[in-house]
C-alpha cells in the first residue's frame, strides 16, 4: 500500500500499522468504505514517522512488527499525547501482558478478527475520545494570543498576561483558520480540511487557503507574533506555539 498522504480530508484519519499486507489491505478497504481516511505503515519506524507528520485521529497498531514492535511504538505515541490507539495482536495472551504494562491503549483486538468488528471498535473509540463541546467555549490561549471563540476575535496578551483591548484586525475567514489551527496546536491540518472547516460555503481551491493564511501570517507578525504558523510541505499547515 502507498504511504502517500490522502488528499481529501472528509473523514477522520486512521493510521494502520500492520506488516502483513493482506490484513492491511482488508482493514484499509473496510475503513475507507466506512468513510474513514487511512495511512498505512509497515513497520514501527515508519509508523512513528507518519504519526508525527500526519497527526492521525486514531492508530490501529499491530503488536508484532519487524524491528521496533508495537509496544514500543505505543510508548512513543503515549509520550506524545492522548491520540487513541487500538492494539492488534495475534495472541490473547498479549492482551493480558499489555494490560499489566498499563501502557494506555484504548482497546484491543485479537486476530483473527472480523474487519467489520474492527471498524466498529475504531468508531466507538473515536466517539469516546471526541472533544466535549460546550455552548460557552472558553477562550483558547496559545503563546501570547488569546482566541475568543464566542466573540470571534483574537487578542494579543502582553508580557504581564494582560489581554489587550483591541482585537487583531482579522477577517472572518482568517479568524476561523486561526481558531481551527489553535484548537489543536502542533497538529498538521491539510489544506482540504481547512477549506472544509473554515470556508465550507465556498468551492475554494488550495491556493485560496494559501492566500488567506499568508494574510493571516502577516497580520500576526505585524502584531508581534512571529512564526506562529508553519507550512508543512506536501500537507498543509500547523500552529506551533513558541517556535
Ligand atoms: Ca504482525
Image (tube, rainbow, N blue to C red):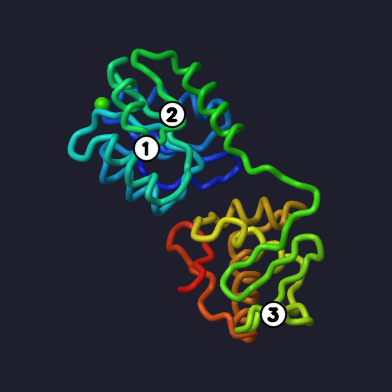
Mark 3: secondary structure:
loop
Between marks 2 and 1, how big is the CA–CA gap? 8 Å
- Which of the numbered marks, if any, corresponds to residue 40? 1
- The residue pinned by badge 2 equals 28
Picture coordinates of residue 85, whole percent (x, y):
43, 35
Picture coordinates of residue 103, whole percent (x, y):
36, 36
Question: Is 219 placed above or below 210 here?
Answer: below
Picture coordinates of residue 167, whole percent (x, y):
76, 78
Q: Earlier in the sequence, mark 3 or mark 2?
A: 2
- The residue pinned by badge 3 equals 162
> Which class describes the residues within 10 Å of circle 2: few (<14), some (14-19), or many (20+)?
many
Q: Earlier in the sequence, mark 3 or mark 1?
A: 1
Residue positioned 34% across, 16% down in the render: 111
Q: Is residue 80 left or right of residue 62?
A: right
Picture coordinates of residue 169, whole percent (x, y):
75, 79
Pointer 2 with pointer 1, Cβ within 8 A: yes
Q: Is residue 21 left or right of residue 209?
A: left
> Which class describes the residues within 10 Å of circle 1: few (<14), some (14-19), or many (20+)?
many
* Nearer the observer, 122 or 97: 97
Residue positioned 78% across, 81% down in the render: 165
Question: Is 123 placed above or below 224 here?
Answer: above
Amino acid at each position: 500500500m502507498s504511504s502517500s498522504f490522502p488528499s481529501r480530508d472528509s473523514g477522520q484519519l486512521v493510521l494502520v500499522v500492520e506488516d502483513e499486507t493482506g490484513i492491511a489491505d482488508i482493514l484499509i478497504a473496510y475503513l475507507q468504505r466506512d468513510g474513514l481516511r487511512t495511512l498505512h505503515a509497515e513497520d514501527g519506524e515508519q509508523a512513528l514517522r507518519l504519526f508525527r507528520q500526519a497527526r492521525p485521529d486514531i492508530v490501529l497498531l499491530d503488536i508484532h512488527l519487524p524491528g521496533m514492535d508495537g509496544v514500543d511504538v505505543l510508548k512513543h505515541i503515549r509520550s506524545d499525547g492522548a491520540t487513541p490507539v487500538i492494539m492488534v495482536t495475534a495472541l490473547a495472551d498479549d492482551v493480558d501482558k499489555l494490560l499489566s504494562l498499563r501502557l494506555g491503549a484504548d482497546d484491543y483486538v485479537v486476530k483473527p478478527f472480523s474487519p467489520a468488528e474492527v471498524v466498529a471498535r475504531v468508531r466507538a473509540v473515536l466517539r469516546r475520545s471526541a472533544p466535549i463541546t460546550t455552548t460557552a467555549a472558553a477562550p483558547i490561549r496559545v503563546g501570547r494570543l488569546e482566541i475568543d471563540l464566542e466573540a470571534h476575535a483574537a487578542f494579543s496578551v502582553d508580557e504581564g498576561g494582560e489581554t489587550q483591548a483591541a482585537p487583531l484586525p482579522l477577517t472572518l475567514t482568517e479568524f476561523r483558520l486561526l481558531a481551527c489551527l489553535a484548537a489543536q496546536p502542533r497538529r498538521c491540518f491539510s489544506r482540504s480540511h481547512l477549506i472544509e472547516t473554515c470556508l465550507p460555503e465556498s468551492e475554494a481551491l488550495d491556493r485560496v487557503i494559501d492566500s488567506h493564511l499568508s494574510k493571516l501570517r502577516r497580520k500576526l507578525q505585524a502584531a508581534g507574533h512571529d512564526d506562529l504558523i508553519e507550512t508543512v510541505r506536501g500537507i498543509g499547515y500547523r500552529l506551533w506555539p513558541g517556535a
